Amino acid sequence: MWFNSFEFWIFFALVALGCRLMRHAGQNRWLLLASYFFYGCYDWRFLSLILFCTWVNFIAGRRIHEAACPQARRRWLTAGVTLSLAVLGVFKYLGFFTREASRLLMWAGLADHRWALEVLLPAGISFFTFQALSYTMDIYRAETKPCRSFSDFALYISFFPQLVAGPIERSSHLLPQVEQPRPKCDEARFRKGFYLVLSGLFLKVVIADNMAWLAGHVFAASPSSLAGPEVLLGVYAFAFQIYGDFAGYSAIACGTACWLGFDLMTNFRRPYFALDPRDFWQRWHISLSTWLRDYLYIPLGGNRGGGWGTARNLMLTMLLGGLWHGAAWTFIVWGGIHGLWLGLHRVWLRVKKPVVTAEARPSAPWWLAGAKWFVTFHLVCLTWLAFRADSLRHALALLGALGGKWEVTDFTLTCAGMTFFFLLPWLAYEFWLERRKDDEALLKSAWWWRAGLYVYLVLMMICFPPPAPAEFIYFRF
């Protein structure tokens, strides 16, 4: 049941109507039932995984809170984290590790054929597992109190707008909204939700799915048959496919939750306007980057280990962040490149000698900011090439084609024309938001500006649908 399907909006209308007619306790039970139905539409067999993950972390959280000694608290924390990660490991990584083990055994001459266990991957398992783990670890840190109601906690884990692709919410933010009565959908909430939903649908239907056709053509072709401009435009297309797809999903999730009285965290903030790698990760998949920072990078030592210690912690965090995306070497390399880039940027900041204090430092000239943006954007695109490629060999072959023959083909002209047509108006709008430094600047503008943008978004969705709808990319993670 995709967000860009008629079935979902019929389902959502029934859910919203039920919430409108019920009091708080009834709303929570209704939303929990709807959330399980929503996930069951993907595969009802994996509802048991959500229930198991919910039960494990609910019990672990209560036992940690009730434990009388630090040793007992650590034992319950270890049990909760181990069981949750074991489920994630079996369903997401067991096939990868058995496949790589068989390759190693064949290389060593200890096996004569390749073998691997193929395990079906449940949609969104990484998202709801991380959300559950943050609850247990927050209780251990005494940053939140355990939930008293199992059904309320189950709704926190399985809330359908953000269940399969985030944002990854924290218990300190979302759980109080589950436990306490929520505001009804007034005019302000309707306007905000409408803006988020409409912009999210545009990002998915118009940008992501149209760019998916271009990127798919390039990454499915033999690298030896591609000219350099075709590879470059294909990488650009995938960069905006994954952005439109994921940011679009997050916007729709936040918009539908807003109509139901919930406020989810912002997950994207114009990431392709970043000026350095740290800036990029403060804008891209914010719920994951802050999760990795708080539950992995800081416990590893964060910035406290000096230059090399900080670089090591950044690399480990990004390698595991890459592995979170999928069980493949391409994701690990993608994370490693980002870890190396972040480490080098941190070293550069240490070496650089500021002339004046940060408070008194003048803003960078436009040409320097433009150069930083250009370099950052293309380094991000380089990492997307590794992320999207079928294998490391495929990624290297595409890199070779990128540096090979440069000629303008018919596909180059088609790809360039479609890219400019679909992307430039939206990028101009995001540039305006970036200059305003306000995610909701449009909602504070004159009504005719909003109406003009909404008409444009709707007409583009009606007149320029994609050749074929594509699944949300992050459902696989």
Image: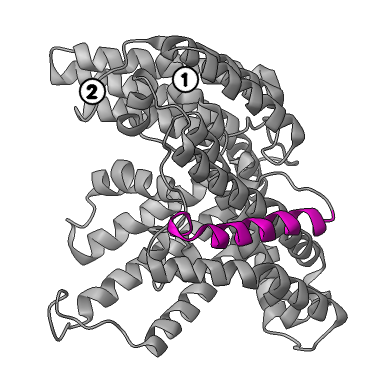
Q: Residue at x 21, y 19 (%)?
A: 73
Q: Nearer the viewer, residue 251 or 184?
A: 184
Kindly tell me whether residue 461 is visible in this rendering. Answer: yes
Disc 2 packing (10 Å; few <14; some 14–19; many ≥20): some
Q: Residue furthest right?
A: 410
Mark 1 or mark 2, which is nearer the start of the sequence? 2
Whether 21 is drawn above or below 372: the answer is above
On whether residue 448 falls in the magenta region, the answer is yes
Q: How many discs mark residues in the rendered view? A: 2
Q: Residue 224: x, y in percent?
A: 80, 75
| Secondary element at tag 2 | helix
What percent of the width, then of the height, locates residue 426? 60, 66
Q: Which residues are magenta?
A: 441-467
Q: Of discs 2 and 1, which sits in the foreground?
A: 1
Residue annotated with mark 1: 155
Residue type beneath disc 2: Arg
Q: Nearer the viewer, residue 60 or 24?
A: 24
Q: Give the quadrant of residue 6.
A: top right
Residue type at the position of mark 1 = Leu
- From the image, give the main secondary structure of the stretch colored magenta: helix
User: Which residue has dot 2 on it?
Assistant: 74
Comparing 136 with 30, the one in front is 30
Q: Does 374 appear above or below 24?
A: below
Residue 440 disc label: none
